[in-house]
Amino acid sequence: MTRTVSVAPGRLGRWLDGFGERHGAVRYDVTPASVTLTAEDGSTAVVAVPFEPLAELSREGLVAHVLRERRLGVLLVRRGGYAAGVFAGGKLLDSKVGSRHVQGTTKAGGWSQQRYARRRDNQAREAFAAATEVAVRILAPAKLDVLVCGGDRRAVDTVLEDPRLRDVAALVQPPFLGVPDPKQKVLEQAGADALAIRIDVDQPE
């Protein structure tokens, strides 16, 4: 049975110890992108290295890597809203959240449908333009180490196409976060989710 767990950076060392305590002696296979634990009872755990590559290829190197303080940017964009934030040490230092109304779809046909479609497209462009300005103001001067994005991929790509965000766009790393329309609490949770370590655990039946 395979399941995926998320572990906060500060809990990773204890989680690795606990895996050995539960399943027996553990062998570590370490690469710059992942760390695989194989236990005595056949259980495995594959740790996806966040913000790869992992430079020191060891268990201790992995723990030090995830605990390293980074200046993290988060950009969330959906048709109904946007948010940009800068985090350091798990704390939100600067942020801006906004929303724009984008017309929903209509069942009307013919000219009415075309008119609604044009209006919706115009509203979406205005919303993405507003999101871009916020990203330029919050993220571009923040001297980020990494950027994590979420929401709608096409919307995020549209924002990051702006030439003023070229350097920021080069810092994008997984995961891509699935989020509802961005609000302040959604942004704060996204900052924590961006740092969480994802581990695929497989235990024999």
Image: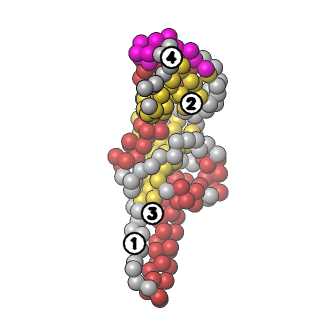
Distance between the Cα atoms at labels 4 and 1? 52 Å
Distance between the Cα atoms at labels 2 and 4? 19 Å
Q: Earlier in the sequence, mark 2 or mark 4?
A: 4
Q: Residue at x 40, y 78 (%)?
A: 106
- The region drawn magenta spans 17-29
Q: Nearer the viewer, mark 3 or mark 1?
A: 1
Numbered circle sitting on residue 79: 3
Q: Which three-letter amino acid code belongs to the residue tagged 3? A: Arg
The image quadrant of residue 5 is top left
Q: Position of residue 118 (x, y in %)?
A: 50, 79
Q: Tally the marks.
A: 4
For label 1, the SS is: loop
Q: Nearer the viewer, mark 4 or mark 3?
A: 4
Q: Earlier in the sequence, mark 3 or mark 2?
A: 2
Local packing at callout 1 (Cα closer than 10 Å; few below 14, some 14-19, many 20+) is few
Q: In the rendered structure, does residue 107 fall within the stretch colored magenta?
A: no
Local packing at callout 3 (Cα closer than 10 Å; few below 14, some 14-19, many 20+) is many
